Image: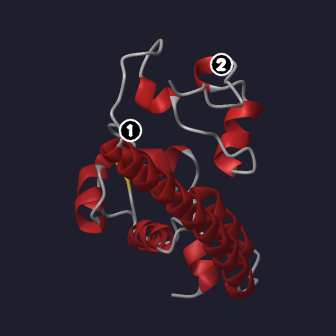
Amino acid sequence: MTASALARPGRHRATFHVAELARRAGVTPATVRYYARIGLLSPAREAENGYRRFSSDDLRRVMFVRKAQALGLTIGDVRLILDEAAHDTPPCHLVLTLVQERLDEVRERLRELQDAERRMASALAEWASDEQSDDGDICPLIEGVALDETDPQIGRLHAVGGCHGRPQETRAPARP
């Protein structure tokens, strides 16, 4: 199947109801309905009862979406790819760009998670070696943590007004 055929659904006779398409594609019926609602699929309607009927092209499109999502692409990315393919433009250059963007995002998220892992491990090691007092309003373990203002996670908290919209301290409270 060509990219343009994949981009233009409904060119073949409809053969599946929602549940059957979902089963064959390995998704839920709700997912099939969602894809139809946002325009990724174009089911035909049965005249006598209004049921949606999906074609083998729709099955290919659902499988395409699943594979794209497995690569980290979003539904918005998939829509861009399908739109480009619908204009008889091979979307592979766009796919390369989108996958590189998602990879960069994943790498940044991994850095953030590694930083969080280091902070957690450090806190646990410190807490294991210190005797903790009951001084503090909520939990002296957390209240005793020093914040690194250069940490992007901390910066995001301050930018949105702290946890639950409450201002956050910028310094750790003094330890007893």
- 89 or 147: which is nearer to us? 147
Residue 126: percent from left, percent from top: 41, 47
Identity of the amino acid at label 2? Gly
User: Residue farthest to the top?
Assistant: 137
The answer to which quarter of the image holds residue 78 is bottom right
Question: Residue at left 57%, top 47%?
Answer: 38
Q: Could you tell me which secondary element the residue under label 1 belongs to?
A: loop
Question: Residue at left 58%, top 88%?
Answer: 2
Horizontal arrangement in the rendering, residue 13 relative to residue 24 (left or right): right
In this orientation, does residue 23 appear? Answer: yes
Question: Which mark, residue 165?
Answer: 2
Horizontal arrangement in the rendering, residue 99 relative to residue 88 (left or right): left
User: Residue farthest to the front?
Assistant: 176
Question: Residue at left 72%, top 30%?
Answer: 170
* Closer mark to the observer between disc 1 and disc 2: 2
Question: Which mark, residue 138?
Answer: none
- 80 or 136: which is nearer to us? 136
Question: Which mark, residue 50?
Answer: 1
Identity of the amino acid at label 1? Gly
Horizontal arrangement in the rendering, residue 25 relative to residue 39 (left or right): left
Nearer-N-terminus badge (1/2): 1
Q: CA distance from mark 1 to mark 2?
A: 48 Å
Residue 122: percent from left, percent from top: 45, 53
Crowd rating for badge 1 (residues with CA inside 10 Å; few <14, some 14–19, many 20+): few
Does residue 56 lie above or below 176 as drawn? Answer: below
Does residue 117 lie above or below 50 as drawn? Answer: below
In this orientation, does residue 32 appear? Answer: no
Residue 11: percent from left, percent from top: 52, 71
Q: Could you tell me which secondary element the residue under label 2 belongs to?
A: helix
Crowd rating for badge 2 (residues with CA inside 10 Å; few <14, some 14–19, many 20+): few
Question: Residue at left 36%, top 48%?
Answer: 124
